[in-house]
């Protein structure tokens, strides 16, 4: 198990959870360090999607995504799961036909289109659709088929979004999926990610893209420490005026943080608790959208969070 308290991991984030024990009973409380006003201000960005925090459900039309239970290699399976996610409370469905897990091999353009276009076309009748791709042609065809957001791990497809009046998610990735986890290094991970995202987001706005989100790219060319530093910095990222999207769901750093013994890593099937904890953290610190495998559980956690927030003056909404 990774040592260190929650206070140690997230100190300086603007919202620190402190647990004090008195006479054998726990006194749990939220301690605000003065930057809570910045967090509250950042939550105005939630109006981007109907005035509430949004949940994006992951639909992998692939045979090799890192979480086996999220693989829907046949269009019919993917469509069925998408409909389930809509019923469970997904606001957006993110459809991808190429795995971008660490070490993944690229998929050809035509093969990727063959995987995703039937799914996009059908599910666009029932929900807002995001196409998860790095390829110009795939993005264009998916928008024509009904997608209205381009989820772009390459951070380069804003001209396509501008051409087709689609929303665009700019994500930071150091390297590419085949080599991104080979000893990634930064002098200041937050500053470098922030600078990249603000640069490309501003370019997108200048190009005419009307909806732009920024995504720090948790797990894409980052170590465990980098990922935690970026989670701590979510209020800072959200303060710039662009809504933030965060994707931590089932990722490997959660398997390390959640393991009971040093040197162990929980299997992706055992990472739901960490996924929910980081989704709630993201929402509490100004994030607008979380990208998840487990829509129902995330919706239940968000419902509880918002019920508490409604009864708590000063709590981030």
Image (cartoon, rainbow, N blue to C red):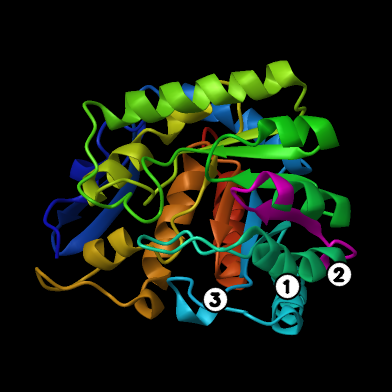
Residue at the far top in the pictured view? 206
Q: Which residue is mark 1?
A: 82
Mark 3 → mark 2, Cα distance in angstroms: 19 Å
The structure residue drawn at horizontal position 52% and vertical position 22%, both measured from the top left corner, is 198
> Can I make out residue 228 in this image?
yes
Asked if the magenta segment contains residue 134, the reply would be: yes
The structure residue drawn at horizontal position 45% and vertical position 74%, both measured from the top left corner, is 67
Q: How many marks?
A: 3
The structure residue drawn at horizontal position 15% and vertical position 55%, both measured from the top left corner, is 22
Mark 3 → mark 1, Cα distance in angstroms: 11 Å
SS category of the residue bearing label 2: helix
- The image position of residue 246, as x and y in percent, is 50, 47
Of callouts 1 and 2, the N-terminal one: 1
Q: Nearer the viewer, residue 216 or 134?
A: 134
Q: Nearer the viewer, mark 1 or mark 2?
A: 2
Crowding near the residue tagged with mark 1, few <14, some 14–19, many ≥20 C-alpha atoms within 10 Å: many
- The image position of residue 261, as x and y in percent, is 11, 73
Q: Quadrant of the N terminus?
A: bottom left
Which numbered disc covers residue 307?
A: none
Q: Which residue is mark 2?
A: 122
> Can I make out residue 311 in this image?
no
Q: Quadrant of the C terminus?
A: top right
- Residue segment shown in magenta: 123-137
- The correct choice, above or below, for 225 with respect to 68 in the image is above
Q: Which residue is mark 3?
A: 70
On screen, residue 69 versus residue 277, left or right, reads right
- The image position of residue 8, as x and y in percent, is 18, 42
Evaluate if marks 1 and 2 touch, with contact meaning CB atoms under 8 Å apart: yes
The structure residue drawn at horizontal position 42% and vertical position 42%, both measured from the top left corner, is 173
On screen, residue 212 versus residue 273, left or right, reads right
- The image position of residue 152, as x and y in percent, is 59, 44
């Amino acid at each position: 198990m990774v040592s260190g308290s929650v206070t140690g991991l997230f100190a300086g984030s603007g919202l620190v959870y402190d647990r004090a024990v008195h006479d054998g009973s726990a006194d749990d409380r939220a301690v605000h360090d003065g930057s809570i006003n910045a967090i509250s201000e950042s939550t105005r960005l939630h109006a981007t999607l109907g005035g509430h925090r949004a949940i994006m459900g992951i639909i992998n039309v692939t045979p090799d995504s890192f979480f086996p239970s999220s693989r829907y290699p046949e269009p019919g399976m993917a469509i069925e799961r998408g409909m389930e996610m809509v019923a469970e409370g997904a606001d957006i469905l993110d459809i991808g036909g190429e795995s971008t897990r660490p070490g993944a091999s690229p998929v050809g353009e035509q093969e990727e289109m063959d995987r995703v276009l039937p799914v996009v076309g059908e599910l666009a009748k029932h929900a807002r659709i995001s196409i998860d791709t790095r390829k110009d042609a795939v993005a264009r065809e998916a928008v024509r088929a009904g997608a209205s957001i381009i989820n772009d791990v390459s951070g380069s497809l804003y001209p396509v979004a501008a051409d087709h009046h689609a929303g665009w998610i700019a994500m930071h990735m150091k390297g590419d999926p085949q080599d991104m986890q080979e000893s990634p290094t930064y002098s200041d991970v937050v500053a470098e990610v922030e600078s990249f995202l603000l640069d490309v987001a501003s370019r997108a706005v200048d190009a005419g893209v009307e909806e732009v989100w920024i995504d720090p790219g948790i797990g894409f060319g980052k170590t465990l420490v980098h990922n935690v530093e970026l989670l701590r910095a979510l209020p800072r990222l959200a303060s710039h005026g662009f809504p933030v999207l965060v994707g931590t769901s089932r990722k490997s750093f959660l398997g390390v943080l959640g393991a009971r013994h040093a040197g162990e890593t929980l299997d992706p099937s055992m990472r739901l608790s960490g996924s929910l904890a980081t989704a709630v953290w993201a929402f509490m610190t100004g994030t607008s959208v979380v990208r998840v495998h487990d829509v129902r559980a995330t919706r239940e956690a968000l419902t509880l969070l918002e019920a508490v927030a409604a009864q708590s003056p000063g709590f981030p909404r």
